[in-house]
Image (tube, rainbow, N blue to C red):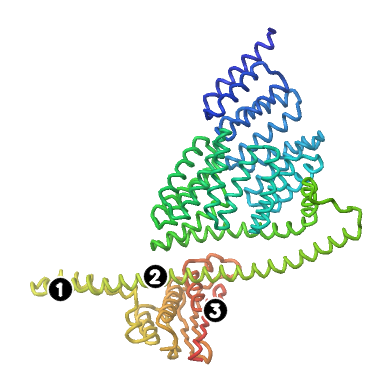
Amino acid sequence: MSEILRRQLFYVLSFLAIVSSSGQPSSAKTEKINQLKSELLFAKDSAQVDLLNKICDEFERIAIDSSIQYAEKALSISQVIEYKPGEIRSLNNVGYHYHEKGQYDLALKYHNKALEIAINSENRKYESHCWNFIARVHRSLSNMPKAIDCFLHSMEIRQELGDSLGLAMVSGNLGYLYWSLKDYENADKYLKQALEIDLLLKDTLSIASDYLNLGLLNQKRGDLDKGIALSEQSMELFKSLGDTEGEAVLYGNISLMLSEKGQFDSALNYLNRSYEMKKRINNTRSIAYTLGNYQKIYQEHGITQKAIQTGEEAIDYLNHHPNIEVSQRVLGRLAEAYFEVGNYKKAYESLSEYLTVKDSILDEEKSRQIKQLQTIYETNQKDLTIAEQKGELKLANAANSFRTKLIWAISLGLILIFSCIYLFRSYRFALKSKQMEADFSRQLLVAHETERKRISQDLHDSVGQSLILIKNKVSLNSDSSTADMVTKALEEVRSISKALHPATLDKIGLTASIEKQMEEIDGHSEIFFSEEIDNIDLIFPKDQELQIYRIFQEALSNLIKHSKTKSALIKIENQEHLIRLEITDYGVGFDLTQDIKSLQGLGMKTLRERTQLLGGKILIDSTRDKGTSIVLHINKPAQHV
């Protein structure tokens, strides 16, 4: 044996020893992996690269952290010996690893490099593989237009090569496309077509994947028993292959179907098995889905605190392993759970984050639909190609220019029609979202005011009465110092109680409450107030009167704190169709074009929110060194117009 060969053998043995300790394969895979490792000891150059990539493939779905080491070693050797097919395959294996770990930028970097080499070396087979890998990453990023475009590139090349497995993949991808558009009828058609081809080819792994997808499709269509049956068929095939990742995914899918059937204990048992298997594999992208599924199951069965706990754990995990689709689901459910337990602050925060994520996906959704319409012609051609392989159809004459022009004219017409439909649906969705947000804010404010009223009542009825009794006892003992302290404490409690909820509003009405507020402020402020206040009692419901009073309080508070004015105008006008409230000062003012913080401060934000809840309009005008004017218009209820 030559010195070079001895060194190479020593190097490979050392590498195998290191990698073997990092991931233990399942028993079904052990024999095959050991056989490949034995062959690797005596392989050289391109054969060595191919064997390293084969071992990587075996580890990918049972111990993903081990697979990357084989892929990186294969990449290193293939680059040294300039073995392009091996380099392309190694780059895609490394990219696949980073994709499954949720590191999408790195995944795209390696897949794009593989694509570049495949194109330059004119290797059409591997080029089709590269397009498919890139499409998967863009799908995970919710970049559906780009994903569809890449899938189409892959489909075209596979048709060109007459690849039967490729035709099955075409059907599967078309099934996914219609599934994502919620066209379950066409999704069922193409997924079954993929299964039929894979059964003819006796490709067990592809058959298992087809049953998995059909199981999920039946779950979406509400046929849970059929969905579970198909999923169990898929699981048996994955088990026979020793495919731990596929088995783990199936346990998770079945757990959700059992949960929908109301079988909580069984659902949780299946999900626990899925989670333990995924942790062993350490596929972070797959683990993220499982953590979200825990939250879903607990929430479906009314275990809200547990749903919140698992939801927060999922969000923490997603912060380190991003997944837009899972984040959207988890945040939406968290908002519902927090609202259910009365934690409105956390509910609002979760809802805001949910809407941010959902908006980003909706932007992609628009592009995806336009792109789908643009590819109608290509999709029809692929339908014909698949049918020809099965002997059902023959290709029409592609040279017919009239037919081509007609198809393009129809496609452009469809683009216009569906664009109009999309814009209309987007408009309706925006209105619905705005209404939901307004309803949510209204409920939060109502809950807030209810709580303030309760605390105010408790202070008045409990603490206030106790202080009065203490004061009377102290007075009887002639302890004037202590009596003064108790009197002061009693006044503070009354002041806090009044600030929390204006009792005068219920007793003397809105107009008198505003006038009384002005009297109190006038007595404790150096600002000269000019007042013109019309009677606006009994125009609005009690809850709206409270909001108007709060707006008046907030605006007046801002004026006293920030305006530095010597005089101010307070005007309330009872006009024919609306109530007009104006608060104007002649103080320092601010520049509306530059001082953005003043407009976005908490006080101004509260004014705007309360005004929106009243269905009114608020106008703010300010000039530096000349003062600020706040004008509020609130439409009267129909019966008072």
Question: Do labels 3 and 1 touch, CB within 8 Å?
Answer: no
Camera-nearest residue between 222 and 453: 222
Going by the numbered disc 1, the residue's amino acid type is Leu
Going by the image, does 396 lie left or right of 523?
A: right
Above or below, 32 relative to 191: above
Which residue is depicted at the point 53% across and 77% down?
A: 618
Residue at image coords 84%, 60%: 407
- Mark 1 vs mark 2: in front: 2
According to the image, label 2 marks what residue? 447
Judge left or right: residue 155 versus residue 515.
right
Q: How many other residues sit within 10 Å of disc 2, few (<14), some (14-19) or many (≥20)?
A: some
Q: Earlier in the sequence, mark 3 or mark 1?
A: 1
Asked if disc 1 and disc 2 are in contact, CB closer than 8 Å, the reply is no
Q: Which residue is mark 1?
A: 469
Mark 1 residue element: helix
Where is residue 269, by image quadrant? top left
Question: Is 467 or 349 nearer to us in this picture?
Answer: 349
Q: Residue at x 56, y 66 (%)?
A: 595
Quadrant where the N terminus sits is: top right
* Amino acid at dot 3: Lys
Q: Which residue is drawn at the image coordinates 57% and 24% (left, top)?
A: 31
573 vs 491, left or right, is right
Marks 2/3: CA distance?
23 Å
Question: Which dot, 2 or 3, sits closer to the camera?
Answer: 2
Residue 588 image offset from top left, x and y in percent: 51, 73
- Badge 3 is on which residue? 617
Q: Position of residue 265 (x, y in %)?
A: 40, 49
Distance Cα–Cα, label 1 vs label 2? 32 Å
How many labels were placed on the picture? 3
Name the element at disc 2.
helix
